[in-house]
Amino acid sequence: MMCLIILIDQADLLGASDIHIENQRESIRIRMRVDGALHTVAELSRDRYRVIMATLASRANISTASREPQSGHMQQEIHRDGVSHVLNLRVEAVMTVYGLDLVLRLFNFDESMLNLDLLSISKKEREQIDEVISHPRGMLLMVGPTGSGKSTTLYSILNALNTPDRKIITLEDPVENTIPGIAQIPIDTTNGQRFADGLRSVLRLDPDVVMVGEIRDNETAKTAIQASITGHLVLSSFHANSTAAAFSRMIDMIGQNPIFSSVVRLVIALQRLVRRLWDDMQGRI
């Protein structure tokens, strides 16, 4: 138990987005992704690995014997400088030739993440965002690679929109952070739930603003476009490396649809987070 807590605490201290627990031939490698780059922080003995795995299996509800890919979720309370906060962690597990590898994604909520003024966006982008969210309908797409800050920016925009005269509903896999006043719905895609089905249900709840965590398929894309046409402001993210790539992928999904270009009011292309100097904390846990 203590090994896992120390591992998560160290990741939180470093500002890591992910913890990678990887089986090697002779040992277990622990790497953490900080500012988009992976760094090795420790080598574990197999005895320590088994202790961590037993705790993870119990808390994230995954099986150490299954050879199928698995997903789980857990929380960890962190205490630092007399203040405590709760980390949400998504756990992904896959069996490799040397054993069960895991990736723990950390969702570390900070109130500053809800403030658009504190994000690394240009003045022009901020003005464009303010102009778009002043309209009651249309679509705003956040595009970028994994770890570029799409979710953080979407949460900040939602918070700016979060006023008593608006009904805001989100569909997320998973709900990374909660915002008071917003109805946030988890979509468990591992158990067959689909964004498109959830979105159709949400549109019957009279929302003003809908956030779809990520557009991943043709049906979700078409439903989101339809929602933006029928009087809703739709926010979503898209995994692509540029605005051009995002439009190309969307056209691949929905075909040459002239309505798409007319309803998308703004596409914000985010790049990788700026990397800081790395303080090597490699050691043995």
Image: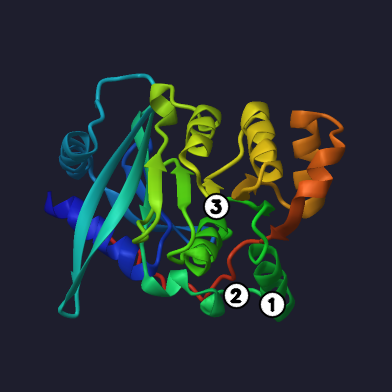
Q: How far is the residue under mark 3 from the one under mark 1?
A: 24 Å
Residues packed near mark 2 inside 10 Å, few (<14), some (14 to 19) or many (20 plus): some
- Compared with 151, 157 (above or below) is below
From the viewer's side, name the closer residue of 127 and 79: 127
Q: Quadrant of residue 126?
A: bottom right
Q: Which mark sits nearer the N-terminus, 3 or 2?
A: 2
Amino acid marked by disc 2: Ser
**SS of the residue under disc 3:** strand
Give whichever of 278, 125 is nearer the camera. 125
Residue at the image position 42 percent from the left and 75 percent from the top = 112
With respect to residue 10, does 103 lie above or below?
above
Which element carries disc 2, helix, strand or loop? loop
Q: Which residue is mark 1?
A: 122
Q: Is residue 284 visible?
A: no
In the depicted view, which residue is nearer to us: 2 or 62? 62
Query: Which of disc 1 and disc 3 is earlier in sequence?
Result: 1
**Neighbourhood count class around disc 3 (C-alpha, 10 Å): few under 14, some 14–19, many 20 upward:** many
Which residue lies under the disc numbered 2? 120
In three-dimensional space, the C-alpha distance between marks 1 and 2, rounded to whole angstroms, equals 7 Å
Corner quadrant of residue 119: bottom right
Regarding residue 238, the answer to whether it shows in the image is: yes
